[in-house]
């Protein structure tokens, strides 16, 4: 069965701290996609990144970076020098590749960044 | 860039009433998905359509139905509403497998907040 686990329910940090959000997935598929979405207090779901199962290259986008390791089935997300605007619920999600598969979400991690 | 449009943004209904939610995908996107998110929960997949045909079905109640029209917009019809149907309903769209690097990435609309009284 496909499953996504985000063990951290809530994290609270002070502005400018670095924070890592953990994501562990389970799948029997050989081809799949992994995603991170951000849900700010306003409620919308904002796409952050997609990773293909065959591409283990890590990625950096500004203050955001992602570490994908197939050996440990993990896809962790790090925010460097956090800001108050980063406060949101972050969801890790998984789908199987190439067939318009539906997203399976983790339970989400609520990040609070205090000034 | 154009995003997914959902209407209405907010909807209040009484128990046993019906509701219709609309979704307009990003231009050129051929696949539409519907998700339901209860308070404090993660989004749960309901149903999806590819090129106007149902492609996958999740935990959608029999009281709900959906379709995708020739212009690719989609509607979710909900009947005999129950208190437990109160939730945020998201529509997402994506470009099918032939879309290259950006294919199969789901972009979400702002959601419709349904309250059943």
Image (tube, rainbow, N blue to C red):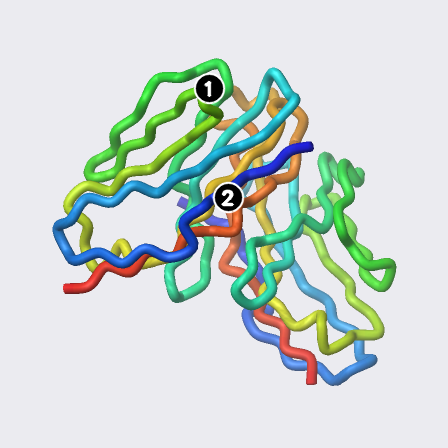
Quarter of the rendering containing residue A12: bottom left
- In the image, A110 versus A88, the foreground residue is A110
* Mark 2: secondary structure: strand
In the rendered image, which quarter contains the C terminus of chain A? Answer: bottom left
In the displayed structure, A29 sits above or below B26; it is: above
Same-chain status of marks 2 and 1: no
Residue at figure coordinates x 58%, y 30% from the top left: A26
Per the image, the residue denoted by label 2 is B107
**Quadrant of the image occupied by residue B97:** top right
- Residue A78, quarter of the rendered image: top left
- Compared with A100, A115 (above or below) is below
- The numbered mark at residue B109 is none
Position of residue A17 measured from the top left corner of the image (x, y, whole percent): 15, 49
> Dot 2: within a 10 Å radius of its alpha carbon, few (fewer than 14), some, or many (20 or more) residues?
many
Q: Nearer the viewer, mark 2 or mark 1?
A: 1
Residue at point 33%, 31% (across, down): A66
């Amino acid at each position: 069965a496909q499953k996504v686990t985000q063990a951290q329910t809530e994290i609270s940090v002070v502005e400018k701290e670095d924070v890592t959000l953990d994501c562990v997935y389970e799948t029997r598929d050989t081809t799949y996609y992994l995603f991170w979405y951000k849900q700010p207090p306003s409620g919308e779901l904002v796409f952050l990144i997609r990773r293909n199962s065959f591409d283990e290259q890590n990625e950096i986008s500004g203050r955001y970076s992602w570490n994908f390791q197939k050996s440990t089935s993990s896809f962790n997300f790090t925010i460097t020098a956090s800001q108050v605007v980063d406060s949101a619920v972050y969801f890790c999600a998984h789908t199987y590749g190439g067939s318009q598969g539906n997203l399976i979400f983790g339970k989400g991690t609520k990040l609070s960044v205090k000034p | 860039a154009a995003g997914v449009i959902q209407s209405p943004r907010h909807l209040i209904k009484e128990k046993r009433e019906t509701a219709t939610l609309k979704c307009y995908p990003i231009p050129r996107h051929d696949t539409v998905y519907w998700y339901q998110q209860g308070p404090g929960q993660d989004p749960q997949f309901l149903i999806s359509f590819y090129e106007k045909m149902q492609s996958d079905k999740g935990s959608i109640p029999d009281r709900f139905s959906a379709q995708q029209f020739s212009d690719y917009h989609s509607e979710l019809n909900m009947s005999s509403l129950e208190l437990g149907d109160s939730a945020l309903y998201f529509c997402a769209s994506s470009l099918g497998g032939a879309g290259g690097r950006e294919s199969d990435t789901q972009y979400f609309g702002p959601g419709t907040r349904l309250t059943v009284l």
